[in-house]
Amino acid sequence: MINIYGKGGHAKVVHAVIKQNEAAASIRFWSDVDFNNGIQGKWVVAIGDNLDRMKVVGLLGSVEFITVISNTAIVSNCKISEGSQLLQGCVVQTGTVIGKHCILNTAASVDHDCILNDFSFIGPNATLCGGVNIGAGSFVGAGAVILPNITIGKNVIVGAGAVVTKNIHDDVVITGNPARQL
């Protein structure tokens, strides 16, 4: 039994990837769980919001989390931690390290030697050039571009379409081309 926590659009996409990879898989959706009731089976938390995903993972505790990788993703010699989700058409190049419960959304491109820390989110068609480091809990919006060897701090929001040309400190929102703090 594979348990998907979430019932929104992101959960539908994760469900499609699991069915694509394991057509006979038995899947159950959850949006509310009695966390004190000895939850069984394999789990993936399919919630796009980083803080909500982190909260649910914490509440689920020591269940077995699975990694979901679309068979249309291109993944080349990298490390992917438990609970992460690599969706349709994303590309992850050699030497990249992906932390726990990260999301690489549709057609995201992550070049060589990047680091995505736990609970980070890379939006559809976002591009991380080589050597980029994304802090824990950070969100990179759709179509954003992060230039080579840039470090994005923890809990940062990079707006859709932003072009990041310099390192970004923790806990800020940046937008524009070049990206600037709001």
Image (tube, helix red, strand yellow):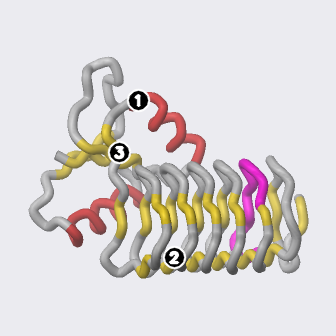
- Helix, strand or loop under label 3: strand
| Type of amino acid at the residue the image marks with label 3 | Phe
Label 1: how many Cα within 10 Å (few below 14, some 14–19, many 20+):
few
Please tell me whether residue 123 is drawn above or below residue 93 in the rendered image: above
Amino acid found under the numbered disc labelled 2: Val
- Which residue reaches farthest left? 24
Q: Quadrant of residue 149?
A: bottom right
* Amino acid type, label 1: Gly
Residue range of the region highlighted in magenta in the rendering: 152-162
- Residue extending furthest top? 36
- Reading the image, the residue beneath label 1 is 61
Q: Could you say which is closer to the camera, residue 160 or residue 92?
A: 92
Q: Where is residue 154 in the image (x, y as percent from the top left)?
A: 74, 49
Tell me the CA gap for discs 2 and 1. 28 Å
Secondary structure mainly formed by the magenta segment: loop
> Where residue 35 appears, x then y in whole percent?
35, 24
Rounded to the nearest whole Å, what is the CA distance between mark 3 and mark 1?
10 Å
Q: Residues within 10 Å of mark 2 (few under 14, many from 20)?
A: many
Distance from Cα at disc 3 to Cα at disc 2: 21 Å
Secondary structure at numbered mark 2: strand
Task: Identify the residue at horizontal 88%, vertical 59% (top origin).
Answer: 182
Q: Where is residue 11 in the image (x, y as percent from the top left)?
A: 36, 56
The residue at the point 26 percent across, 63 percent down is: 18
Q: Residue 89 carries which label?
A: none
Q: Label 3: which residue?
A: 65
Q: Which residue is rendered at x = 81% and y = 73% of the image?
A: 164
Residue behind mark 2? 92
